[in-house]
Amino acid sequence: MENTSLEQIKTIVAKQQSFFKTGKTKDLCFRKQALKNFLSAVEKNEQAIADALWKDLHKSYEEAYLTEISLVKGEIKNHIRHLRKWAKPQCVLSPLALFPSSSKIISEPLGCSLIIAPWNYPVLLLLSPLIGAISAGCTAILKPSPYVPNVSRIMQEIIESTFSDEYIAVVQGNREVNSQLLEQKFDIIFFTGSPDLGKIVMGAAAKNLTPVVLELGGKSPCFVSEDANITLAARRIAWGKCLNAGQTCIAPDYLLVHENVKDAFIAEFKKALQKFYAENPQASKHFVRLVSEKAYQRVKSYLSDGNAIVGGKFDDAERYIEPTILENVSPDSPVMTTEIFGPILPMLTYKDIDEAIAFVNSRPKPLALYAFGANKTTKKILKETTSGGACVNDTIMHIVNHNMPFGGVGNSGLGKYHGKLSFDAFSNKRAVVFTPTWIDLPVRYMPYKFFLLMKQIL
């Protein structure tokens, strides 16, 4: 797509800064109506969104709706339903030293926001943060990914037909445009992408002391314990890995399987794939393709890092890679040190759970962690590891609950969102003490005649 010029970017930023200063976005009725208009626009363009996802990613309508459109609609409805409660000043207790004052926490919008989205879930990961920005009372500039041009185009059409650019605007282009955007002064930057790019965003934000939310990625481990329900584990892991052809930041990235259940797991994994896609995933409308030639070649290269015991086929013409499990992989190989973002799943085996836990803890903190096994085993895994989020005897599904925070830790991200936390992410929590004038106790004033009394109180 054509790059938005630097002059246009500067103009949009200036317009949004001026519009925010009018205070219109702080009005709750304004925000609620904006959310309702937003919901109406998404519903009106459902088919167009799904068609664009098919063109760019070969994503079926069913998968487009379940993993992107429905989640956006649900999030908007949740904010409409709870906005007034979330925005209400929160009364908190005041210590005796503040008598007779009262204390409140007031949520106020941070201001002009920048939202940079990736290509893998180009609808959800662009519009979901926007919901929080609107709900909190911010303006927003959206930067979709150039790797999904059809989706980026429909996103721009939806935004431009729903909002004025002084309030919400879309900027298009490549990484050069990202750099130009990051040179501007924003009040908050929300970025979803790789850890390497997250460091660039954080470095640029630091120049202006701009707060950031960084939704990054990493290598999410998947434990399959000896006491796991192997049939269920194989099915849910296969589903989590095949969703969007593995191009999911919280996809299972590598397997840690107890050596006693390895063969059973492989057999059940094959059965699950056969139920999902019959004999040929390539022929299924429900199997997504790699987004670009560069991504395809990168993921394809990982096939040489081990032996394919499931899958292993590929088709250059379609950027298709079959769901694959690799064994005999080195912990230092590219497939084990780089986030895969594709339908390849390297497998390591272990004898003792402490051995597997130590391996995970020796690596950067992941965005997600999955543990399959009996209650005692999974509790131990959760207690002795850390991650941004986790599922026990499941994959992916923790992202669905808007009552829980979503985000990373350490190398996998900074900040949380979804539901009220999206509102909070774009808000300043302002502490305000309200002090009456009917009394003015002298104890706090110099020369501190009542110091001994105050020392007892404090």
Image (cartoon, helix red, strand yellow):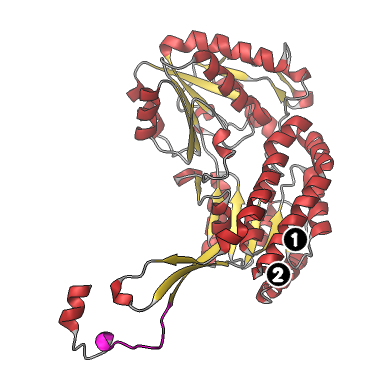
Residue 130 x %, y %: 67, 55
Tally of marks: 2
Is disc 2 placed on a helix, strand or loop?
A: helix
Q: Is residue 206 left or right of residue 315?
A: left
Residue 451 drawn above or below residue 237: below
Q: Residue at x 72, y 11 (%)?
A: 279
Is disc 1 placed on a helix, strand or loop?
A: strand
Residue 249 drawn above or below residue 180: above
Residue 422 drawn above or below residue 378: below
The residue labelled by disc 2 is 16
Residue 205 x %, y %: 55, 61
- Which region shows up in magenta? 434-444
Measured in 3D between alpha carbons, the distance from the residue under mark 2 to the one under mark 1, in whole angstroms, is 9 Å
Q: Is residue 323 visible?
A: yes
Q: Is the Cβ of the residue at disc 2 closer than 8 Å to that at disc 1?
A: yes
Which amino acid type is shown beneath numbered disc 2?
A: Gln
Residue 78 drawn above or below residue 320: below
Q: Main secondary structure of the magenta part?
A: loop
The residue labelled by disc 1 is 169
Q: Nearer the viewer, residue 94 or 144?
A: 94
Q: Is residue 156 left or right of residue 453?
A: right
Q: Earlier in the sequence, mark 2 or mark 1?
A: 2
Residue situated furthest left in the rendering: 452
Residue 133 shown in magenta: no
Which amino acid type is shown beneath numbered disc 1?
A: Ala
Residue 439 shown in magenta: yes
Around disc 1, counting alpha carbons within 10 Å, would you say few (fewer than 14), some (14 to 19), or many (20 or more)? many
Residue 297 x %, y %: 68, 29
Around disc 2, counting alpha carbons within 10 Å, would you say few (fewer than 14), some (14 to 19), or many (20 or more)? many
Q: Nearer the viewer, residue 116 or 229?
A: 229
Q: Residue at x 49, y 39 (%)?
A: 389
Q: Give residue 448's mark.
A: none
